[in-house]
């Protein structure tokens, strides 16, 4: 099979010519493409570290992944060290238009070979990541790791009935918020520290109340420790079910929605953490009626929370449209959350990030004022017809032009660069 299309760059003159033609088409609908591109450039997507090494981390505890998490596939070239993971991330970012962020889990600490348990983690154990982020001009986000640990082996952490185990995980949460604050202060860019726990039960529980009472007390203790809000924002993330917690999850959507409103925390909506037939689109405006900001984890669940690589599908487009139509972009922290070990991991980052950004561009190119006017006067016929016509508007030409101006490969040319990186770097990893 010929791979010429992966290595042949489209002439800039052709891209600019197509852009001018598309620009005129959109202008006829009242859409300013230059304004859309300028707005798009202000969106910073947080790339998740765990795609690069299948949620392995660098603790070397010998624990299975746990927490209901599973990375499927054995594609060669997985990052084995912090420097390899950083190098892979830099390569991915060079193929993604715009300036973005990096999202790190606590189990990616660099402890110099010393055994440091998670309740003992300090900002110094992440100094390598902070220095690297500063060099790259990236903001960073952070996550406590409530899985892949002996004290999480039974699927309970902050809601654990054992006081000692619960205390350990409370101390971990406090340590991670301090680390998040140190990251934000060092980089001059607010860090979002997101709490997700796997706690739940595989079969029918008798007492659904006590675990949630314990979780509330634990979270309150974690959040009671002061951390400068300018440096760190706290977020809590729900889930419908997990492997090993099919019947009951302590931190459900309803639980965390109430907690976030009552305690003034960010709520994380993970697109894979709801029923397969349920979309988060309607939840966005609903939660914004009570919350100032949210964290959005973008994944692609297929029949369950399977964390497939994000693509431009109806679900992603609907989310992007809701964020733009509701004027929620400035109030939403967008991050990716998936881990696919069946394909090139660097490519997985690029595919997902470019898809998220592309979906936002398509949403920004909507003639929102026109659509609102049609809706306000009750012309639902024209509204539906217009939405259908927009599907064939030349947004691809605008996207290509954006990639050109952001100095990243246009079209499938980036695939060739990943293939070359695989040959030069990834294939040499045993």
Image: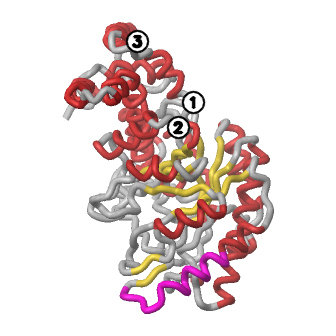
**Residues under labels 3 and 1: Cα distance?**
24 Å
Residue indicated by mark 1: 42
Q: Residue at x 53, y 78 (%)?
A: 63
**Residues under labels 2 and 3: Cα distance?**
30 Å
The answer to whether 415 appears left or right of 63 in the picture is left
The answer to whether 423 appears left or right of 80 in the picture is left
Up/down of 372 relative to 106, above or below: above
**Residues under labels 2 and 1: Cα distance?**
9 Å
Residue indicated by mark 2: 329
SS assignment at label 3: helix
Residue indicated by mark 3: 12
Q: Earlier in the sequence, mark 2 or mark 3?
A: 3
Q: Nearer the viewer, mark 2 or mark 3?
A: 2
Q: Residue at x 44, y 45 (%)?
A: 349
The answer to whether 99 appears left or right of 8 in the picture is right
Residue in the foreground of this view, choosing between 360 and 130: 360
Span highlighted in magenta in the image: 203-218
Q: Nearer the viewer, mark 2 or mark 1?
A: 2
Question: Residue 152 appears at what percent x and percent y?
Answer: 55, 81
Asked if marks 2 and 1 touch (Cβ < 8 Å), the reply is: yes
């Amino acid at each position: 099979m010929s791979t010429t299309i992966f290595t042949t760059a489209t002439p800039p003159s052709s891209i600019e010519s197509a852009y001018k033609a598309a620009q005129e088409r959109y202008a006829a609908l009242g859409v300013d493409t230059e304004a859309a591109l300028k707005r798009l450039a202000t969106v910073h997507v947080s790339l998740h570290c765990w795609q690069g090494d299948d949620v392995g981390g660098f603790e070397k505890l010998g624990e299975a992944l746990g927490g209901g998490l599973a990375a499927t596939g054995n594609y060669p070239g997985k990052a084995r060290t912090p420097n390899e993971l950083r190098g892979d991330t830099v390569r991915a970012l060079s193929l993604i238009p715009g300036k973005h962020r990096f999202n790190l889990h606590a189990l990616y600490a660099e402890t110099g070979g010393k055994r440091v348990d998670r309740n003992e983690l300090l900002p110094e154990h992440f100094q390598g990541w902070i220095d690297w982020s500063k060099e790259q001009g990236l903001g960073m986000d952070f996550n406590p790791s409530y899985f892949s640990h002996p004290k999480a082996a039974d699927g309970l952490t902050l809601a654990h009935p054992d006081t000692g185990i619960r205390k350990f995980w409370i101390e971990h949460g406090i340590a991670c918020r301090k680390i998040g604050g140190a990251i934000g202060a060092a980089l001059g860019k607010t860090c979002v520290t997101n709490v997700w726990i796997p706690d739940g039960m595989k079969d029918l529980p008798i007492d659904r109340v006590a675990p949630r009472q314990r979780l509330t007390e634990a979270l309150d203790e974690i959040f009671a420790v002061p951390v400068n809000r300018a440096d760190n924002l706290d977020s809590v993330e729900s889930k419908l079910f997990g492997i090993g917690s099919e019947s009951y999850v302590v931190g459900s959507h309803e639980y965390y929605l109430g907690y976030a409103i009552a305690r003034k925390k960010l709520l994380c909506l993970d697109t894979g953490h709801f029923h397969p037939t349920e979309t988060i689109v309607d939840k966005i405006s609903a939660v914004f009626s009570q919350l100032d900001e949210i964290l959005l984890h973008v994944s692609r669940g297929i029949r369950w929370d399977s964390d497939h690589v994000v693509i431009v599908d109806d679900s992603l487009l609907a989310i992007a449209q809701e964020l733009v139509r509701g004027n929620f972009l400035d109030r939403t922290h967008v991050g990716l959350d998936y881990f696919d070990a069946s394909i090139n991991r660097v490519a997985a980052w690029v595919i997902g990030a470019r898809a998220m950004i592309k979906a936002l561009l398509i949403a920004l190119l909507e003639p929102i004022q026109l659509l609102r006017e049609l809706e306000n006067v009750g012309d639902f016929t024209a509204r539906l017809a217009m939405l259908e016509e927009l599907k064939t508007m030349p947004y691809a030409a605008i996207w290509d032009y954006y990639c050109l101006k952001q100095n990243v490969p246009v079209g499938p040319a980036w695939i060739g660069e990943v293939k070359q990186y695989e040959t030069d770097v990834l294939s040499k990893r045993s």
